[in-house]
Structure formats: C-alpha cells, structure tokens
Image (cartoon, grey):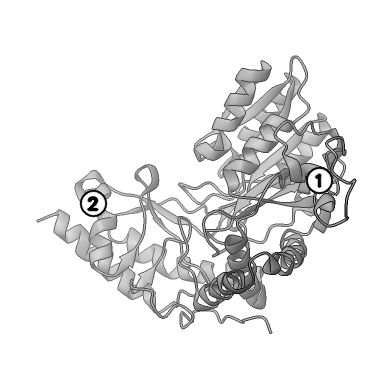
Amino acid sequence: MAPTATLGDRSLFPDLSPKAYLNHAAISPPSAPVQAAVAQCLSQYTQQGMGAFMTYLEQREVLRASLATLVNVQPGEIGFVPNTSWGVVFAAMSYPWETGDGVVLLDGEFPTNVTPWQQAASLYGLDIHRINAADFGSPDPGNGLAQLDVALRAGAKVVAVSAVQFQTGMRMPLMAISALAHRHGASVFVDAIQGCGVVPLDFEKLGVDMASCGGHKWMMGLEGSGFIYVRESLGPRLRPRLSAWLSHQDGLGFLFDGPGHLRYDRPIKTDASMVEGGAYNTLGFVAMHTALDLIQSIGVQDIFAHVQRYHDALEPKLTALGLTSLRSPSPGERSGVLAFDVPEAFEPTKLPERLAARGVSASIPDGRLRFAPHWPNALEEVDVVAAAVADAIAEANK
C-alpha cells in the first residue's frame, strides 16, 4: 500500500530539527517513508545484486506513469535524468537548430535555464534575445509578451522559461507564452523545478513542448534524480547528439536474448527515454517514487491551497516588521515561494543564520529572503516564524 500524507502534519519527518522548515524551494528533507524505501532498495541490492535490477527497472515504469499523471502527459513523453540541468543541456544541444535561429532567455532566471542555452548559442551560432522575467508579471504582463513577440518575429525558435521564478515566486504565464510561441512556429522549454509538486501544472493544457525537473525540491525526493518531458510530436525532430548505449531502441536486448544480438546500429529512440543513456540512480528514483506517492495521496491542488493559506497568514506579519513582500497581487501568479526584500539595516545576508538559531530554516537567494512551506508545514508555525524574524531583526539593530 502506498504511504499517505496529511496537510500540516510533519509526523513523517520525526528527525527534522527546525521548528519550521521553510526551505523546500532549495532542498526538501526526506520523509520516513522515503528513507525506508531507499533502505529497502539498498538491502535488496545487497542481498541479490543483479537480481534486484529487474525489480527496480519495472518500478521505474510505474514512476514514469505517475510523473505523466502529475503533469498530464503520456508516459512515453517522460524520460529520466539526473537533475534539471541535464534535461536543459539535452534540450539545448538536441534541438534541430538552423542557421538564423534564436533563443529567448529571461533575465532573473536561475542559471540552470540560461547557461546551456548560451552554450548552444555559441556552438550553433544562435541569436540570444533577452527579456526581463519580471516584465511578464503584474501590473502589465503584456509588456513581456510584446517583447517576446518581437523576438519571435526576429527568428527565435525556443523560449526558455521557468514555471516559477526562484527569487520572487512569480508564476509565469506559460499558457500565453506557449500560445504566442506556437503562432510563430517556436517551441517552449520549461524549467519546472520550482513548480512540480506544489503548483498544479498541466503541460498539455499549458502548451509546453519540453520541460525538465529535479526531484529534490518540491518533489521531496533526493538529489540526483529528475525527469524530462518531450512532446511526442517533437521527439522525432530532435537530434540527440548526447546519446549513449541505452539511448538505442532495445538497448538492453543483447544482455538477455542470447548470442548474435550485440549491435551498434540500432536506431536511437525518438521518445523522451532517448535521454536515458546509461545506468540510473536507482536509489534516487526509488525516493522520488515514494515522495510522489505522498504528494499524490493529498493532491497538488490541495497542497497549493494549503501553502497559500500559510502565505496569507505569514505575509502581513512580516510586512508589519518592515519587509517588502514580492508576492504577486494576482493569485494566478502565485506559487509555493513567499519572498521579501529586506532593508539593509536588517543585515539580510545574516538573516538565514539568525533564523536557523531560532529554529526556522529559510534562504536568501540573490538577496531576497525566501520562505517555502510545503504540505507538512502546519499553519500554527506562522507565529513561531514571525517571532523568529522579529528577534533576528532586533539582533541586527542592537
């Protein structure tokens, strides 16, 4: 039976030290069921060696189907990668670029969704079109879309965008971006790591063509495991330049089918599993599978609503202390992240350490104080967090 979770109940994290763990946008701690599943897998490999391989190969196919359900795509459109970055690299290097093509990159994005595209631009002679990510948000999201239209008319063939901006928590208008890109014959690639697991994401409805997501943040798994999505119609057009032995169709067959099956000319796969070129991080995908079962036992829509209630309670308490909330006034632009600009007098770079000393785990990416609760966080924590921030500010003012 799959494990189940309850909103606001952290009993599945008995060893978690902070009173309020609000760093799921960075790394999620593994739950007890995740630890148990990893330990069981390791034990099976310890006892059986190769005998455990097929068991977990089959389990990965169940995970593939669960991930497809999570983002509303087909299982064949899901491939396994070690992290978000590898998925971005694969997409950037495998896209069927032509002379005169360009790529749209957003200022403010996490470097994961910028650096590989810059490298592809250098290698293939692509034009880079830059737009500030904030221009897609309130009060005038049309500003960013207007700039995007100009870039697409100038030959951009891929728009690289995060589902959620890591600094501010702004949810990007993926449906509008995709619709505009498709009108110009371009594709949309999404870095989904700040969305999957906490924000409802329907790739089919949103019009996403490719996406990548690591499993160690809102998915609540471990580092070293992730997935890529490739729209079925796009797969055959890709040029999988970064391929290895398991990228071939029936790549495992020669190991089990007797003599005469070792060949090097088998076609490269055309679905998303083309990214799966070598041995897997089996323990990482076992963790992802168990963590995803917990998330789906609640439902992402309910998790998102719970997190918004947490934000609703915490935001006014912190703005009253002098912090400036970066949360969008538009509910459609909100996510799992609640971020603040902090006055220099409050010594923002020292806040995470001071909060940790008071039992609150938060982070400060690029100078913004970021809180990221998830399903285990209870609303009763809010007063503890607010008091910790007040004490940390008072320490700075001594």
In the image, is residue 51 above or below residue 108?
Answer: below
Residue at 81% from the left image edge and 45% from the top image edge: 231
**Relative to the observer, which residue lies in front, 61 or 183?**
61
Foreground mark, 1 or 2, reads: 1
Could you tell me which residue is drawn at 61 percent across and 42 percent down? 86
> The N terminus lies in which quarter of the figure?
bottom right
Q: Who is closer to the viewer here, 49 or 111?
A: 49
> Residue 201 placed where, x, y %?
69, 57
According to the picture, the residue beneath numbered tag 2 turns out to be 350
Q: Is residue 281 left or right of residue 352?
A: right
- Going by the picture, which residue comes out furthest to the front? 259
Is mark 1 in CB contact (under 8 Å) with mark 2? Answer: no
Residue at 83% from the left image edge and 50% from the top image edge: 254
Tell me the distance, in whole angstroms, between the alpha carbons under discs 1 and 2: 44 Å
Residue 306 in sight from this viewpoint:
yes
Quadrant the C terminus occupies:
bottom left
Picture mark count: 2
Q: SS class of the residue under badge 1?
A: loop
Circle 1: residue type: Arg
Instruction: State whether residue 197 appears in this view.
Output: no
| Rendered location of residue 12, percent (x, y) | 49, 80
Please provide percent x and percent y for residue 275. 72, 44
* Image vertical order of residue 85 relative to residue 294, above or below: above
Which amino acid is tagged 2? Answer: Lys
What mark, if any, has residue 231 been given in the picture? 1
Graded by Cα atoms within 10 Å as few (under 14), some (14 to 19) or many (20 or more), the crowding at tag 1 reads many
Question: Taking 24 as reference, is 153 above or below it?
Answer: above
Q: Secondary structure at mark 2?
A: helix
